[in-house]
Image (cartoon, rainbow, N blue to C red):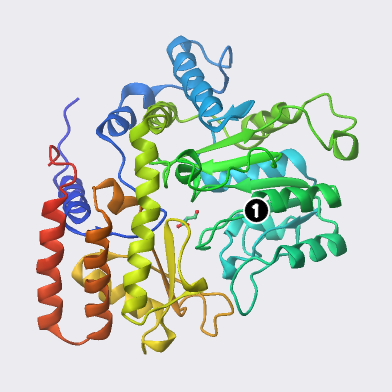
């Protein structure tokens, strides 16, 4: 069964070297542990297991059941919820399953606009969520760039959505899930909280948990949670708060509606190697070391923000409460795309991003988004983040100077050697 694939090996080795030798600063990315990598590369990928533990459509699932039950019980304990489904292939399918479970096509959803920091699946027009549902998005305040909860409440009162979505991909401040819970309760809407970006921060108790307020919580497992690509859908409470309004005639409770939406509604066989890796990551996330990790992510983001401000960068909302920073480059004579390319040239990976009320086009926006989860996994601390901000400033302020780029590459090499990654892999 040995197979050699030189071209693929070469690309794989090059990607490993890119991760080892560069500064990974995309806020939704991270580095998983060798234990998570081992689970992902295991024989579990060979097995079909449509259904759920104890109720499968294929034989030979006795060990898969053990693994999926481990992942489920660890998710329930870690987040303090009554129900968890660990089968969604990733974040977008997870959110799709929640819509499928709770709504009929054409019903009204209210999530944060993509251009203000929301996600495609929160009602954006080119995704299923904006095409098959009636989307009435909220945004952030024009001056402060913060969510104005009074404005969200007003919109909810006017539009009466069936589903409100709280969560973001480019919002550098804490989200008040309690306020969203009150808004959803007042208008009789379901509240879905998408904590993909901040799940690890919630576990580390450096961000408010949505569990007391939400009907459904979704998260990807590969961002601050530091697991494999994948997602979990959780129900804080199994009983449906809005059953009389929306599902009176249904024999299923909320948890069953979610499970049935994932399978057989939208997916086929679960990716068992991914489920095992999620179980491993959840075990890792239940340790005191992970709590320290989450705390350090936030400390690092603040240190990075402070030093970027010292270099006269404009930060959306003036700073950060979480793991990410959104820079508005309009005072630097560079677009977000140009900055992304320039930083790539020296080995700093960020992504171009719209800023709220952007005057440029989404494919070439005014901002870049950067974060600290991956560098914090490597052991970077506040002192290192100050140096990282300095090299970012060097590059952005000297876009055409090759000598500056050369000196930055040397500094990055020193930083990455001080904090090695996957030392045992080649
Ligand atoms: N693609 C993710 C991000 O980068 O934020 C959201 O799903």
Tell me if I can see residue 324 in this picture: yes
Q: Can I make out residue 29 in this image? A: no
For residue 42, what is the image quadrant? top left
Q: Quadrant of residue 239?
A: top right
Q: Quarter of the image for the N terminus: give it.
A: top left
Q: Nearer the viewer, residue 3 or 368?
A: 368
Mark 1 closeness class: few <14, some 14–19, many ≥20 residues within 10 Å: many
**Residue in front for this viewpoint, 119 or 76:** 76
349 sits left or right of 2 in the view: right
Q: Residue 215: x percent and y percent?
A: 71, 39
Residue 68 placement (x, y as % from top left): 49, 21
Secondary element at image label 1? strand
Total residue callouts: 1
Q: Quadrant of the C terminus?
A: top left
Q: Is residue 58 above or below residue 315?
A: above
Q: Residue at x 15, y 47 (%)?
A: 420
Residue 183 position, x and y percent, is: 78, 53
**Quarter of image, res 348:** bottom left
Q: Percent from the top left, x then y, of residue 286?
A: 42, 29
With respect to residue 340, does 158 lie above or below?
above
Residue at image location 65% in from the left, 53% down from the top: 166
Q: Residue at 89% of width from left, 40% of height from top?
A: 245
Q: Is mark 1 within 8 Å of ligand 1?
A: no
* Residue holding disc 1: 166
Horizontal relation, residue 25 to residue 2: left or right? right
User: Looking at the image, is 59 positioned above or below residue 371?
Assistant: above
């Amino acid at each position: 069964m040995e197979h050699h694939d030189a071209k693929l090996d070469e690309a794989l080795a090059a990607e490993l070297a890119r991760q080892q030798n560069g500064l990974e600063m995309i806020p939704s990315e991270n580095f998983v542990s060798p234990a998570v990598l081992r689970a992902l590369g295991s024989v579990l990928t060979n097995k079909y297991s449509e259904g759920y533990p104890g109720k499968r459509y294929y034989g030979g699932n006795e060990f898969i059941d053990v693994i999926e039950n481990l992942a489920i019980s660890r998710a329930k304990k870690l987040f303090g919820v009554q129900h968890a489904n660990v089968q969604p292939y990733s974040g977008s399918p997870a959110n799709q399953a929640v819509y499928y479970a709770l709504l009929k096509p054409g019903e009204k959803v209210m999530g944060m606009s993509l251009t203000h920091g929301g996600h495609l699946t929160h009602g954006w027009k080119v995704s299923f969520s904006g095409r098959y549902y009636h989307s009435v998005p909220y945004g952030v305040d024009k001056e402060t760039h913060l969510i104005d909860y009074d404005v969200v409440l007003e919109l909810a009162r006017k539009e009466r959505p069936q589903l409100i979505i709280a969560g973001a991909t480019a919002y550098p401040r804490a989200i008040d899930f309690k306020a969203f819970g009150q808004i959803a309760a007042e208008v009789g809407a379901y509240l879905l909280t998408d904590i993909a970006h901040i799940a690890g921060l919630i576990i580390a108790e450096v961000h408010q948990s949505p569990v007391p307020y939400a009907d459904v919580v979704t998260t990807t497992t590969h961002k601050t949670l530091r697991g494999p690509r994948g997602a979990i859908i959780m129900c804080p409470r199994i009983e449906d708060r809005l059953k009389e309004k929306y599902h009176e005639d249904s024999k299923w409770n909320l948890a069953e509606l979610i499970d049935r939406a994932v399978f057989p509604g939208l997916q086929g066989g679960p990716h068992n190697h991914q489920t095992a890796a999620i179980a491993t990551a959840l075990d890792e996330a239940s340790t005191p070391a992970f709590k320290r990790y989450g705390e350090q992510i936030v400390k690092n983001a603040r240190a990075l923000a402070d030093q970027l401000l010292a270099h006269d960068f404009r930060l959306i909302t003036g700073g950060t409460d979480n793991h990410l920073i959104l820079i508005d480059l309009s005072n630097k004579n560079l677009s977000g795309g140009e900055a992304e390319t320039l930083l790539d040239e020296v080995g700093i990976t960020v992504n171009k991003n719209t800023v709220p009320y952007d005057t440029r086009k989404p494919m070439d926006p005014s901002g870049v988004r950067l974060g600290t989860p991956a560098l914090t996994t490597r052991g970077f601390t506040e002192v290192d983040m100050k140096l990282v901000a300095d090299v970012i400033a060097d590059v952005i302020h000297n876009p055409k100077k090759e000598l500056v780029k050369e000196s930055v590459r040397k500094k990055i090499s020193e930083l990455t050697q001080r904090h090695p990654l996957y030392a045992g892999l080649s």
